[in-house]
Image (tube, coloured by chain):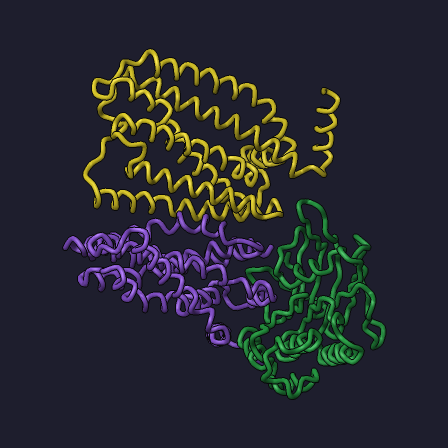
């Protein structure tokens, strides 16, 4: 396909007819939507509606059963992963034996570093000042989640894919997540959050996509 | 599109394959059993006995075709595994995994007959002969593939992982064969060959060839029977599978 | 904006995996203890007669180290899989085979290298002839990385399973046969005063080939397991 010069910049993330099949049973989709810079989109759905699977497909971890994922207009596959995408899953991807600092340094090595921020800053902004050198297994579940959130602040990813970011967090933590999302959107990032609906992104009115609503177009 | 490519596409669709295999199966079983009977009669009754090994040599009519099949089926399994991994064709996944137990069975028959033959010839049930040892490792490779396939819950992921292992195995197989040969010459002198191509009489040869054909047919028949069942199970939710089940229910 | 190079990603992985091993340095001794105990069992089973033990010493040490390596393999990806680090590793845009090669290297350095260091002691316990010791060490130095690399491919295939220990042995051991044959062959040849270079060169060739192919295969296997 050679489209004539596009009138606008391609969206940060675009899903075209995206579906995932497990043993030929559709887990979700087909789903089409786009995320532009500054968008925070809430992906709603009941348990088992395929929210986690969707995030894995969008991040490139799972190959889609149908359709495609475009990142800045280019296809995203396992063979072509991008520094632009950061995934925060159910499993946080942090090591219990290591301190928050050690965990963050590893994340920077793997994912790169956003200019103008240090691991200390990031830990301070998620409220973990003073915990820098404590092994993670001595922290609470919510504090571990904050370490994982600090990782998002550090790596230079424009697209955040967050799976149930509000789980395990207290009221203060929920406000923190919302504040981080707001900041990220203001800086030209975008985020896709899943939630089963108990907590929600409260700043402004985020776009919502219901995952169980199959075959609906959400073109902006 | 090329008609051959089209035919492959059609063959790859489970309902079409299921029907085609159903039509072929009686023929395959029939041909397999008839050639088995002819081959066994020729080998066990008609062929003259060996001047050196007398009647003990007759076990080659089972042993040698099984040995050939053990390698042939591993190759078949790996080839289908390769197709399954590259093009994600469900039929190839099913065929590869359906072939594994059949291949293991042939390998076991080859080992058992080799060991039975060893008793009168070498005086022991087992000898670390290079060929027998390679066959033993081959049996373990089959077990690995089957074990991995059983251990993973998601059927399609299981067959992909097992197919990958089969591919690793086929890279390893020549290395095993080479190393075992090397090891064998290091530790003992030349072994008695069960079957040397130069010293075989044509009256001994034809039943062997018939048996080789019989095992191919039996493998094909067994493979298609297994693959049909596996496909039904895999596609249990699909319309065609439901129709098949309903039709079977009506017939019963 | 700095995305970091693949080199810095590998360095970060080295630093992290070494710190993890350091945090659990007690566990790192387990394979060594296991190998020592396996070797100690042999005189009990066969009798303490030096000639009998010397005959089987090289082979026994090889098998004991092979089994110890097999036991430690299971841990290669387990904790990374359980806490989600493996997902982050696979999602990193750096070449996955390269990252996995680093992980395998750390695993070899922290499990196989200590085994290599106790090998002379194990040989001494079984009256290993002095002439065979250098050959045994050379064979081990070439074969243990081979075992780690081949093993890593199989571990990658079983990574999602809860109890994979026995299955892993079933998958790995047939693939280990050629390595064992050449390593033991070199030691036997040394014992009989025959040239030892050929089997060692075969091992070296195998290692060179596996060093390239195994990380690629490992990455492919891991992606199958994670899908």
User: Of residues B34 and A161, which is closer to you in this image?
Assistant: B34
Colour for chain B in the figure:
yellow
Looking at the image, residue B184 sits to the left or right of residue B231; the answer is: left
> Is residue A143 shown to the viewer in this render?
yes
Q: Is B25 situated above or below B69?
A: above
Q: Nearer the viewer, residue C225 or B136?
A: B136
Against C160, is A81 above or below? below
Locate the C terminus of chain B by quadrant.
top right
Q: Quadrant of residue C3?
A: bottom right
Q: Which chain is green?
A: A
State left or right for residue C214 relative to residue A34.
left
Which residue is depicted at the point 70% across and 70% down? A9
> Where's residue A21, x and y in %?
68, 49
The vertical placement of B35 against C29, above or below, is above
Q: Nearer the viewer, residue B22 or C34?
A: C34
Q: Quadrant of the N terminus of chain B?
A: top right
Residue B196, position in %: x, y? Answer: 25, 28
Q: Residue at x 82, y 70 (%)?
A: A199
Residue B72 locus on image (x, y percent): 41, 34
C83 displayed left or right of B53: right
Q: In the displayed orientation, state which residue is furthest to the top.
A: B46
**Chain C, colour shown:** purple
Q: Is residue C213 visible?
A: no
Q: Toward which corner of the image does residue B228 lie, by quadrant?
A: top right
Q: Position of residue B45 (x, y in %)?
A: 34, 12
Who's the residue at 64% across and 56% down the image?
A1
State the residue lying farthest toward the left. Answer: C193
């Amino acid at each position: 396909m050679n489209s004539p010069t596009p009138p606008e910049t391609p969206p940060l993330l675009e899903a075209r007819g995206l579906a995932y099949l497990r043993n030929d049973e559709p887990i979700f989709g087909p789903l089409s939507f786009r995320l532009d810079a500054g968008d925070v989109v809430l992906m709603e759905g009941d348990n088992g509606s395929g929210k986690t699977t969707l995030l894995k497909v969008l991040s490139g971890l799972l190959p889609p059963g149908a359709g495609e994922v475009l990142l800045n207009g280019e296809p995203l596959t396992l063979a072509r992963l991008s520094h632009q995408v950061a995934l925060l899953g159910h499993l946080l991807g942090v090591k219990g034996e290591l301190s928050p600092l050690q965990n963050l340094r590893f994340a920077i090595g793997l994912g790169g570093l956003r200019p103008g921020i240090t691991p200390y800053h990031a830990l301070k902004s998620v409220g973990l000042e003073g915990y820098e050198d404590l092994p993670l297994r001595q922290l609470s579940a919510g504090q571990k989640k904050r370490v994982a959130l600090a990782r998002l602040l550090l790596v230079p990813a424009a697209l955040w894919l967050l799976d149930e970011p509000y789980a395990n967090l207290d009221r203060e933590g929920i406000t923190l997540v919302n504040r981080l999302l707001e900041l990220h959107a203001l800086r030209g990032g975008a985020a896709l959050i899943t939630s089963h609906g108990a907590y929600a992104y409260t700043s402004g009115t985020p776009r919502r996509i219901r995952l169980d609503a199959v075959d609906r177009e959400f073109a902006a | 599109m090329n008609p051959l490519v089209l035919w492959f596409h059609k063959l790859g669709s489970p309902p079409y394959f299921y029907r085609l295999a159903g039509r072929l199966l009686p023929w395959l079983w029939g041909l397999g059993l008839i050639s088995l009977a002819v081959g066994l009669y020729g080998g066990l009754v008609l062929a003259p006995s060996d001047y050196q090994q007398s009647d003990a040599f007759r076990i080659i009519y089972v042993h040698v075709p099984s040995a050939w099949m053990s390698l042939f089926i591993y190759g078949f399994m790996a080839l289908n595994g390769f197709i399954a991994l590259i093009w994600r064709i469900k039929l190839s996944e099913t065929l590869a995994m359906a072939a594994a137990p059949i291949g293991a069975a042939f390998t076991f028959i080859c080992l058992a007959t080799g060991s039975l033959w060893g008793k009168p010839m070498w005086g022991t049930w087992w000898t670390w002969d290079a060929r027998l040892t390679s066959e033993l490792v081959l049996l373990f490779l089959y077990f690995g593939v089957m074990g991995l396939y059983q251990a993973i819950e998601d059927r399609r992921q299981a067959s992909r992982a097992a197919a990958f292992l089969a591919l690793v195995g086929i890279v390893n197989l020549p290395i095993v064969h080479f190393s075992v040969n090397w090891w064998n010459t290091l530790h003992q002198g030349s072994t008695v060959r069960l079957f040397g191509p130069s010293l075989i009489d044509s009256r001994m040869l034809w039943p062997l060839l018939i048996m080789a054909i019989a095992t191919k047919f039996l493998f094909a028949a067994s493979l298609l029977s297994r693959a049909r069942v596996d496909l039904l199970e895999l596609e249990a939710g699909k319309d065609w599978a439901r129709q098949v089940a309903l039709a079977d229910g009506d017939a019963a | 904006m700095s995305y970091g190079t693949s080199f810095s990603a590998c360095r970060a992985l080295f630093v992290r995996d070494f710190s993890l091993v350091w945090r659990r340095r007690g566990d790192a001794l387990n394979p060594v203890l296991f190998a020592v105990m396996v070797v100690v069992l042999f005189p009990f089973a066969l009798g303490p007669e030096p000639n009998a033990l010397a005959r089987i010493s090289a082979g026994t040490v090889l098998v004991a180290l092979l089994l110890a390596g097999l036991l430690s393999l299971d841990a290669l990806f387990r904790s990374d899989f359980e806490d989600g680090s493996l997902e982050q590793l696979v999602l990193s845009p750096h070449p996955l085979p390269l990252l996995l090669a680093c992980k395998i290297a750390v695993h070899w350095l922290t499990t196989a290298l200590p085994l290599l260091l106790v090998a002379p002691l194990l040989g001494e316990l079984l009256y290993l002839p002095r002439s065979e010791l250098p050959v045994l060490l050379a064979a081990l130095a070439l074969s243990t990385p081979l075992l780690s690399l081949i093993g890593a491919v199989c571990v990658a295939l079983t990574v999602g399973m809860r109890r994979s220990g026995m299955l892993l042995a079933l998958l790995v051991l047939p693939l280990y046969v050629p390595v064992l044959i050449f390593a033991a062959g070199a030691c036997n040849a040394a014992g009989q005063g025959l040239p030892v270079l050929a089997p060692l060169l075969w091992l070296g060739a195998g290692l060179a080939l596996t060093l390239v192919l195994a990380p690629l295969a490992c990455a492919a296997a891991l992606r199958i397991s994670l899908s």
